[in-house]
Amino acid sequence: MRTVQSQDHLAEALASAYWRSLALLDLDHSTQLPARTKARAISVLVDEASRKFGADSSFTRFSRDGLAILSEVETAECWMRAESIRGAVASRKLATLSAGVAPRRKKDPSLTLWEAEAALMQAKASGRNKLVLGTESNMVMKSTYFPRALLGRLARAARTVGEPESVLLRQALEDFLRSREL
């Protein structure tokens, strides 16, 4: 395990060539936790991250109660390890953990940080205690109006399948375009 000394060194580490994916893990509602509980939850987070990622990764504090992991493993493996850490923290019933994972963008590694941060924020916005994969930078925001009843059905479907509404909308659009061979 290589330890990046501080968040100031994160930019330098992002520019290095040895990593393939980035995971940002952050305790949920940490400001509401008693100090001892928060300290134990952070200890579990660091211990689990060290155990799951080990020598093929670098670690740094990302936020007051979070950890950034620059990993040499592919994104899918990074995702599985981060999910394992999330589950381990939750199983101890100390706190929950949200995470964002993104693949390295070779042309602009700093974009990876932006994508992982956006994924982390999406995990927190969609109910916390979740893991979200960062989106590609070629995605564009598109908004429109929907009938309330339709949005209600979408919200119920999202809760049922455990996916964000945005993911279900993208899947539905893809299915529609594929069915029309467009």
Image (cartoon, rainbow, N blue to C red):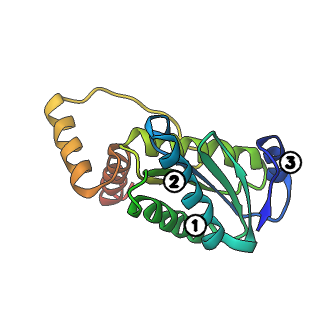
Q: Quadrant of the N terminus?
A: bottom right
* Residue at horizontal 35 percent and vertical 47 percent from the top: 164
The image shows residue 142, relative to residue 37, as above or below, that is above
Q: Residue 104, image x and y in percent?
A: 70, 57
* Residue at horizontal 29 percent and vertical 26 percent from the top: 145
- Of callouts 1 and 3, the N-terminal one: 3
Alpha-carbon span between mark 1 and mark 3: 25 Å
Of all residues shown, which one is farthest toward the front? Answer: 36
Disc 3 marks which residue? 12
When asked about the image quadrant of residue 22, the answer is bottom right
Of all residues shown, which one is farthest toward the left? Answer: 149
Q: Residue 140, image x and y in percent?
A: 52, 37
Q: Residue 138, image x and y in percent?
A: 59, 44
Helix, strand or loop at mark 3: helix
Helix, strand or loop at mark 2: helix
The image shows residue 42, relative to residue 75, as above or below, that is above
Disc 1 marks which residue? 48
Indicate the amino acid at tag 1: Glu
Disc 2 marks which residue? 41
**85 relative position to 144: left or right:** right
**Residue 137 seen by the camera:** no
Helix, strand or loop at mark 1: helix
**142 relative position to 57: left or right:** left
